Image (tube, rainbow, N blue to C red):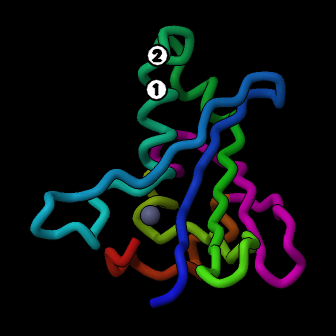
Amino acid sequence: MNRFAGFRTFISFGGSEIYGPFLPSMAGPSDHHVSSCHAEVNAIKYALSLKGIRLRPKATMTKATLLVTRWSKHANANTWQLEDGVPCLSCLKFMSAKGIQNIMISSKSDERMHAVRVSDIIASSRPSRGTR
Ligand SMILES: [Zn+2]
């Protein structure tokens, strides 16, 4: 495929505090097309490891916003394009379990980020096929 694509996730607390980008982490070399941990999960795990958040995880995470972006780059054109960055069902469930309620998702059609609630998109999401 003559094209690159990628996920980047950021996590923001009140807009003034933002961490990222977080990338998916890959499985072993024999299986390098399958990511073992999606970028969203990496962002949440990192936030939960921070001292200030570790003390009050749920209270802090309910105020967090997870920014989930996906982009693509065509090899022949030096331009980047936003793609639909809707998280997979397992990531959405992980967010929900950790208290994350608000996320922003990149959209290909209008090339911007959309604020959505995790609970609103869980029903319409699909399980991961491990192709990230
Ligand atoms: Zn995922």
The residue sitting at 40% across, 78% down in the picture is 127
Which of these two is toward me, 113 or 121? Answer: 113
Q: Quadrant of residue 35?
A: bottom left
Q: Does the magenta stretch include residue 98?
A: yes
Q: What element carries label 2?
A: helix
Q: Is 1 on the left or on the right of 73, as rendered? A: left
The residue sitting at 69% across, 76% down in the picture is 83
* Ligand 1 placement by image quarter: bottom left
Kindly identify which residue carries mark 1: 48
Q: Does the magenta stretch include residue 65?
A: no
Q: Residue 112 location in percent, x, y?
A: 86, 66
- Which quarter of the figure is the N terminus placed in? bottom left
Q: Do the residues labelled 2 and 1 touch (CB within 8 Å)?
A: yes
Q: Is 40 on the left or on the right of 11, as rendered? A: left
The three-letter code of the residue at mark 1 reads: Leu
Q: Quadrant of residue 87?
A: bottom right
The three-letter code of the residue at mark 2 reads: Arg
Q: What stretch is highlighted in magenta?
A: 95-117
Q: Is residue 103 above or below residue 58?
A: below
Q: Residue 102 location in percent, x, y?
A: 72, 49
Q: Residue 105 location in percent, x, y?
A: 72, 63
The residue sitting at 42% across, 21% down in the picture is 49
Mark 1 close to ligand 1, CB under 8 Å:
no
* Label 2 environment density (alpha carbons within 10 Å; few <14, some 14–19, many ≥20): few
Which of these two is toward me, 71 or 58? Answer: 71
Which residue, as the protein is rendered here, is positioned at the far left?
30
Kindly identify which residue carries mark 2: 54
Q: How many labels does the image show?
A: 2
* Label 1 environment density (alpha carbons within 10 Å; few <14, some 14–19, many ≥20): some
